[in-house]
Structure formats: C-alpha cells, structure tokens
Image (cartoon, rainbow, N blue to C red):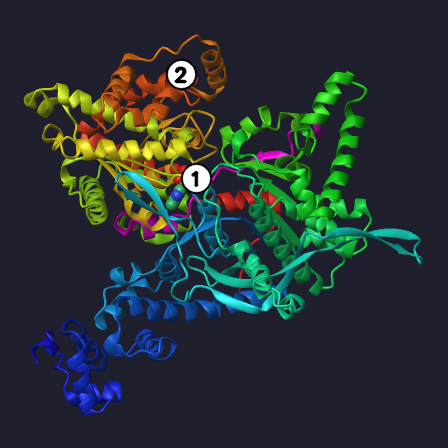
Amino acid sequence: MSDYQITSNELPAPTYRHKRRLTGFSLNEIKSIEAQIPLSSRSLWKKFAVKEFSEKSDFERDFVHHIETTLARSMYNCDDLAAYQAASNTVRDKLIVEWNETQQFQTLKDPKRIYYLSLEFLMGRAMDNAMLNAGVKDLVKDSLSELGFNLEDILEQEPDAALGNGGLGRLAACFLDSLSTGKYPSWGYGLRYQYGIFAQRIIDGYQVETPDYWLTFSNPWEIPRHEIQIPVDFYGFVEEEFNPQTNETKKIWKGGERVIAVAYDFPIPGYSTKNVNNLRLWSAKPTTEFDFSKFNSGDYQNSVRLQQRAESITAVLYPNDNFDQGKELRLKQQYFWVAASLHDIVRRFKKTKRPWSEFPLQVAIQLNDTHPTLAIVELQRIFIDLEGFSWDDAWEIVVKTFGYTNHTVMQEALEKWPIPLFERLLPRHLEIIYTINFFFLQQVEKKFQSTYSQKELENLLSSVSVIEEYYPKQVRMANLAIIGSHRVNGVAELHSELIKTTIFKDFVKVYGDKKFTNVTNGVTPRRWLREANPELAELIASKLGGYEYLLNLNLLKNLENYLDDKDFKHKWDIVKLNNKFRLTKLIKKLTGIEINPTEYLFDIQVKRIHEYKRQQLNIFGVIHRYLWIKSLSPKERKSLVQPKVYVFGGKSAPGYYMAKLIIKLINAVGELVNNDADAEGYLKCIFVPDYNVSKAQIIIPASDISEHISTAGTEASGTSNMKFVLNGGLIIGTVDGANVEITREIGEDNIFLFGNLAENVEDIRHAHRYAPHLELPESLKQVFEAIESGKFGEGDEYKPLLDSVRYHKDYYLVSDDFDSYLQAQELIDEAYKDRDDWIQKSIISVANMGFFSSDRCIEEYAEMIWDVEPLERD
Ligand SMILES: *Cc1c(COP(=O)(O)O)cnc(C)c1O
C-alpha cells in the first residue's frame, strides 16, 4: 500500500509482519483496524517503521511506554494531543526525579526557605520551558520527528496555565523561574483554580467571556498530594476558656464550617541546574463528614449543597486587574489559601525541632500584594491561641517573618473589607486585628503626642489605623500589611518613591523610610528571550559564545561590540522579519486578516484593557492617522505615509463597562480601516483575541514599537515593556513605572517618551475639576467628530468614552497628552526610515537590558528582604 511507503532510503516499508510485531495484533485484526481508520492515520505505520529501524533513545522508549500504559492507547491511533500527553509525561518523569532529590536534599540541609504567597501564578505552558531548562529540547524534537511528529504542533496542544490576570501573576511566575535557577530554597503557594482567567472571544466587535476549563485532560505538570489534607475553618464563634492551672483565660475559635485543602504540587525547574523547587496550589474539597442528620431526614439536597459550597472556593479566579471588588467568596479564598499554606510552613518548621525563636531565621514569607495579608493575622493566631506565646513574643517573630510588595497607588485597587463581613467569616481574626491595631496606634500616639497638636495627632491616627471609619467600618489590608511586615517594597523606582509620598506617607512619619524600599521588577530571559524568540537568542549566542548570557544577562552588553558588523545587523533585521511572519500567521489564523509583514512597521499594545493604561489614547491616535491618510492624494500617501499595523490585545474585566467599550471601538476601527482601499498598504488595525502568555510569546518578538502609555504615576512598573525591549523592539511611552529605568539603561535616544510627568498630574486634574469646561486640542476634536459621525457604527455608542474626556474631567489626561503622543508617533515614522540607525537602536537597547532580568530582582529580595542564600545541590 503506497500510503505506508517510507520515503527515506534506509527505511523499508513496514510489512504486515512488522505491524504484527509492533502491535501484538493478529493479521486479521490489523486488517480490520486498517479498514476502519482514516487514511491519514494509517500513515502512522510509518512511525512504527521508523521506530523499528532507528536507534531507540530513552525518550522514544519512554514515550511509547506512556502511550501504551498511561494513556492506554497504541501508536496507531496516536494523534497530536496523545503525543503531547505522552511527551510531557516523559519529560515530566525526569523532572520529578530531580524535584524529589532537591526536596530531600533541602530537608536534610534545612536552610532558610522563601515562601512566595501569590493569589496568581500566570505560568503559561510548561512543556517547552521544562525542555529548555533541562537542555533536552533538541533531543526531544529529533526523537519526535523520528516518530513522525512535529514538536511545534505538539507543544500547541498544551493549554496555558492561566491562573492570573496580568502583570502581577506573571511576575510571580518569572520569580519562580529565577528562584529555581538561582538555587534558592523556595516554595510558591497559591490556589488551584479550576477555571483560570476566562477565555476571550470577540463577537461583532464585543468581548465575550467563556470559561477556561484548563483541566479537561489530565495535567502531567501537577502531582496531586491527596495525602496532604489540611482542614480550614470559617465562621463560628470565639470561646473563652479558663485554665485553672495558669489562672488565665484563653480565646479559642470554634469554626462553624470546615473545608479541606488538598495540595497539588507543580515542579519548577531551574535553567541549567538540577535544582527543582515546588509550587504548591491548594484545591478545596468538602470534609468527608457528611451531614447525615440532614441526609437521614430526607434533606439530601441541602446536605449535598454544603459539599458543593466547599468546592466553590477554588472554582474560579477573580478576573479583575488592579481593582478590588470586595466579594465574600474572595475573602474566603484568601483565608483558605493562607491558612493551608501557613499550616504547611509551620508544620515543616516544627519537624526540625528548632526553638521558635529561630522561626524568622528559617522562614521568609513574601506577600505578593495585600491578597495574602491575613497570613500575618493567622501566624499571630497560631502563636497565641495554639502555641501559647505571649503577645509580644509572637508579634516580634511575625514582623521579622513577613515582607510586603505593593503593586499600585490607585485607590480603587486598595483592598478593604467591611467589618460585618469579616466578623462573620473570621471572628477570631478580627479580634486579633483590633489588638494589633490597638498596640500600633498606642505606639504612634506615644511617639507624636509631645510634638503634634491634638488635631494633627487625630488625623495621623485615623490615616494609619487598620480600621477605616466608614459606613460600615472597613479593614484596610495595606495598612495591616505594612504594620505586620519588616519591609515594604514598591516595584519600580518611581513607584517606590510615590508610595512614600502619597498613599503611605503617614507610615513614613511613623517608621522613617528605612522600612520602605524598592525592587524594580524583571522578567525571566529564559521564557521571554530564548523560548519566545529562539532565532534572536541563537543569533546573540553566536556572538557571545553560547547561552551563558541567559544566566548573567549583563553579558548582553557585549553586543555593543558588533554595532559595525554589517552581517550581524542584517541577520538582526531578518530575525525581526521572521518573527513578524510568525505573528501574521497567528493573526490570519485568529482573525482571517492577511498582512504582508515586509511592508509594515509593527506597533503593538498588548496588556489588560484599562483606562489607566490608555488603549483609548492609542486608538484615538489610529483614527487620527486614518483621517490623515484619507486626506492625502495617492501620490502624497506614497511619499508621506509610513505603513503601520497597529496590534492590540488584552482582556477587560467582565464588569468593566468602559474597558469593554474601548475593545469595541478598536474592533470597529479595524473593520473600517482594514477594508478601506485608500488605507490599503498603509494602515491595518488588528485586535488579537484572547491575549495570554503563549500568545505573548509570539506577539512580543514581532514588534518594532510597543506602547506603554499609562497616565504618569499610575503604572507601578509594567513588565511587558521589559519583554518588548529585550526582544529588540523600541518603546513609545510615558515617564511612568519602569519606563524611567529602561530609559536610564538604554539611553534616551532609544526610546520615544511623551506626555505630562507624574509630578504634574495632580495639578492638572485639579485644573480639570475646576475648569468650567475642558478645551480639547484640535486633533482630538477631529477624532471625536469622526466617531460621532457614525464612521465606526452607531456614533452614540461611544458617547461614554468621549464624555469621560470632554465632560467628566478627563481623569486619565487623554486630552492633555494627545498632541505630545502624536508628535512622538511622527518621530517614530521619521526614525524608522533610517533602517540602519533603527537596527542600531534596537541592538543597543537589547545590549543594555541586563538589569531587567528577574534573576537580579531575586538577588535583591534575597539580600535586602529575605536574608537567604542559595543552596547548591551536591
Ligand atoms: C507580561 C504580561 C503582562 C503584563 O503586561 P504589562 O504591559 O506590564 O501590563 C500581562 N499579560 C501577559 C500575558 C503577560 O505576559
């Protein structure tokens, strides 16, 4: 049969004898199978044949083993999904061996450990990363190809682990990679949501959310630890117990509802090391103590409902980025996660039999934002209620143990919980919070009573208090996190300065500024350069003598030796073009729109959709450009217009009306522009649906320009700005977040900055508030008129978006920054014409991005906040 013919000379076609040997089936069985399976699958016989006649590597043997046992299938009906599952199980098996040995080694050495508590881990895919870190990608690729599979297609089968919203969750993932690579004994703790961030579909231009059930197929990258089951209580009441021996009364919390936390472990490989750390995610299960009284009385429905209520705790990730919704289930998630994690951490410490005073010498807990702040209270409760410490002894240990990372200065993102809700859910914790606050305020009062007036003192106390006087009163999680930590850090220099002068300025009065520090964010070059952009990584390696730079990103500096190397610069250019091809293929697949990448400058803005990130500014700019192109004659277009494709991507929170409207406008503009013959070859506007980590890995390497244009003072750091520049793209941006430090590192000639500065934003807002009406620049007026004329569908639809600028005080300073933004875009067009100089800028930028490796972040945390050392496995 011709379909079975092997094209390669050395390999004969499989005979029925071969097929029988390979499958163990009889001749008749094989014939009947062949009659049933489609022709395309029959070519799988080829794979057997190749396997039979090639040298069997370990990988191939294990791969086939997993097909036949783990999946209980056989090679003849192995599709790409099955191949992915078998291949990932094979790679994982190797990883687990190293993971086990790392854990055993650490138990033996008992070093100080870092515990990174984050409600979000935006991990993306694991397979490619695991292979690259272990250095087996080429081997796997070759073996799979011998078996008749294409590795790239197989990697596409893996669903993203999308247990996060955006930057904060991805930061946690980059940190885990750097912790393992740096050989730091460390654990991540989070929740195993059954549904990660929703999948986004675009229907008629609108965002539609669909559930992300990422666990449809068994997940080889997690190990269920059914033996690790930790009870977590909620509700109930606080009892006082009198101990006649000590003559003391003790408070005991009697919980009213119990849920079980089951551990799922995710091995985190480091790059070029056998060190494999652990990410432990908790899943909520009902207790096995079924309510038989209800059951027996015939109330089966209600007895089952309670059980389902337990599982709902880890059902879904809250899809808000930089916004606090204040829902009861969210507070339940937080306590469930914190209680299980601390139980685990304390249990691990107790096993060593060290005195409690050594706890902060052995344990460093980092709070990723205020989401895990309850950990401070829970540890104090464990020490006081369960271990019998005095308040002061307990509190001293607690404060030494915790560090808190702040991620925003925006009011709407600061977590606050109504006291009535808190009291019902966690009555004992609220008592402890009151006591923490009482002692803290007492200390503040003592410090300032002689120098402050009564009024000043009252103002200070009410500002730093954990309790906000409101209706109802609220618990301020950020204040609690500051008081309960020995160090507080922001995530970029500007941001760390802003927290000291704005939201936390009164805490600086209390503590001085030593408690407040900065650790500028970073990204892992393993995922964001080598994995995302293998061609650029290889080109760089060819000049720097290998991939050592992935472990010491400052080595990139040596690329500056090749600024006059014509061949190198040419290759640099080709790599960018190839990456644009890769992106246009993805765009074609997702939207049907075809783009010839050779013609266009790629201008990309991908990140969560948010008014403060100002995608509206970008799309208004696109409209302005479109109107300009329309106003030109064909001849003028040819000579004046730099062809550009604007790529947008990102999710809006499902309940965020204005962000959803921005998505709709982007799609409407795309609909018009992409089908207008006058704009053909000059302008495209694309919205890539369902932006996530694996799409980011395709999108980011293709950019010439990326947009990081938040209102100055609102973006704490940004990390995609770092990813883009690391991949040879230049930035148009505001003087905000880490853009400031990127500029310092790469030089201001290599970045297109615009807009008002953070120091002026408050004054401008103040002027807006008291101006009788806002005067728009002519350029923006034209854009608004075009929108209202109905060019992009019903003009009225976008009224709220335009009104927020025109009539509602333009909080994000779109009108103030618009002309400055357009000027920066013109400078870009001008600069892009000189391609040689552009490539020069690109190379210099990459050469100076060493600082933005997350390895550097982890070293800074280790030194300034955690006081931990790496532990080398022998
Ligand atoms: C890096 C990253 C982000 C953060 O992007 P910013 O532009 O810094 O907000 C968000 N989502 C994904 C998928 C990312 O990879």
Left or right: 125 as drawn, with respect to 412: left
| 601 with respect to 163 (left or right) | left
Determine which residue is flagged by label 2: 807
Name the residue: 31% across, 13% down.
Answer: 777
Judge the density around disc 1: few (<14), some (14-19), many (≥20) Cα neighbours within 10 Å: many
Q: Do we see residue 871 in this rendering?
A: no
Find out if the beta carbon at label 2 lies less than 8 Å from the nearest ligand 1 atom. Answer: no
Q: Nearer the viewer, residue 204 or 447?
A: 204
Residue 783 spot, x, y in % from top left: 26, 20
Residue 591: image quadrant is top left
- Count the marks: 2
The question of residue 533 being in magenta is answered with: yes
| In the image, residue 771 above or below residue 804 | above
Q: Is residue 222 above or below residue 649?
A: below
Q: CA distance from mark 2 to mark 1?
A: 43 Å
585 horizontally vs 873: left or right: left
Find disc 1 in the rendering and name its residue: 851
Dividing the picture into quarters, in which one does residue 359 lie? Answer: bottom right
Question: Which range is magenta?
Answer: 510-538
